[in-house]
């Protein structure tokens, strides 16, 4: 059995590619059939033989800063895909500043595999990757202290605590650099530190 209840699949319906969710699986002497609800027409069910279904191709996952650039280019600037892949544009400092483009896009797009990923995201849609989170750890007298942001007041503190209801201590790269570029040198990936604490 290729598929199970809850799987998203693609199939041909009325001469076009359609998508849906499997709700029931039925095996018989003639093979396996799946009861599928079409995304295009809710509450429309159909039984489809296993050989007529294909798995839904997952959307490409891209970093948030890439998604931000892609969204602005398509919706605000009405750029074409070829214009969006032109690395010379991202080398122009005035362009990057004027449109608040994350400077990392130039390095990211310089890899051919990322250009293909960008093109797939442009054409088919995308999911945004979770951004990595970091603690900012300072060590003094063999004790670790962490940068904390008081949530209700926006004040920065250095504390022994790793986050609480009142204080935020996990930050994205952009958040850290916006507070102070020099803090980036003291970053520790959240996963690394939490593995040690366990």
Image (cartoon, grey):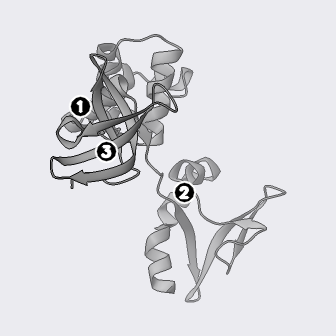
Residue sitting farthest toward the bottom: 142
Where does label 3 land, which residue?
A: 34
Above/below status of 167 relative to 173: below
Q: Residue at x 35, y 19 (%)?
A: 84
Mark 3 surroundings: few (<14), some (14-19) or many (≥20) residues within 10 A: many
Q: Quadrant of residue 19?
A: top left
Q: Quadrant of residue 53?
A: top left
First in sequence: mark 3 vs mark 1: 3
Screen quadrant of the N terminus? bottom left
Where does label 1 land, which residue?
A: 116
Q: Position of residue 142 (x, y in %)?
A: 55, 89
First in sequence: mark 2 vs mark 3: 3
Tally of numbered tags: 3
Measure how far apart labels 2 and 3 are at the Cα level: 57 Å
**Marks 3 and 1: which is nearer the front?**
3
Q: Position of residue 49 (x, y in %)?
A: 22, 39
First in sequence: mark 1 vs mark 2: 1
Q: Residue at x 58, y 54 (%)?
A: 176
Q: Residue at x 78, y 59 (%)?
A: 151
Residue sitting farthest toward the right: 153
Q: Are marks 3 and 1 in contact (CB under 8 Å)?
A: no
Query: Which of the pair 16/122 is nearer the observer?
Result: 16
Where does label 2 land, which residue?
A: 182
Left or right, 60 with reference to 63: left
Measure how far apart labels 3 and 1 are at the Cα level: 34 Å
Measure how far apart labels 1 and 2 are at the Cα level: 34 Å
Circle 1: element type: helix
Mark 2 surroundings: few (<14), some (14-19) or many (≥20) residues within 10 A: few
Q: Position of residue 98 (x, y in %)?
A: 55, 20
């Amino acid at each position: 059995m290729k598929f199970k209840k809850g799987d998203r699949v693609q199939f041909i319906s009325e001469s076009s590619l359609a998508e849906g969710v499997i709700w029931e699986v039925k095996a018989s002497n003639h093979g396996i059939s799946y009861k599928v609800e079409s995304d295009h027409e809710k509450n429309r069910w159909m039984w489809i033989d296993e050989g007529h279904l294909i798995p839904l191709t997952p959307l490409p996952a891209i970093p948030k800063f890439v998604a931000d650039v892609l969204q602005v280019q398509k919706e605000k600037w009405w750029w074409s895909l070829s214009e969006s892949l032109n690395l010379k544009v991202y080398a122009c400092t005035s362009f990057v500043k004027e449109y608040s483009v994350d400077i990392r896009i130039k390095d990211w797009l310089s890899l051919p595999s990322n250009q293909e990923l960008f093109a797939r995201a442009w054409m088919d849609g995308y999911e945004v990757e979770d951004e990595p989170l970091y603690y900012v750890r300072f060590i003094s007298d063999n004790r670790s202290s962490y940068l904390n942001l008081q949530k209700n007041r926006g004040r920065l503190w250095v504390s022994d605590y790793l986050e609480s209801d009142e204080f935020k201590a996990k930050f994205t790269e952009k958040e850290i650099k916006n507070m102070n570029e020099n803090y980036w040198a003291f970053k520790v990936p959240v996963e690394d530190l939490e593995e040690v604490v366990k």
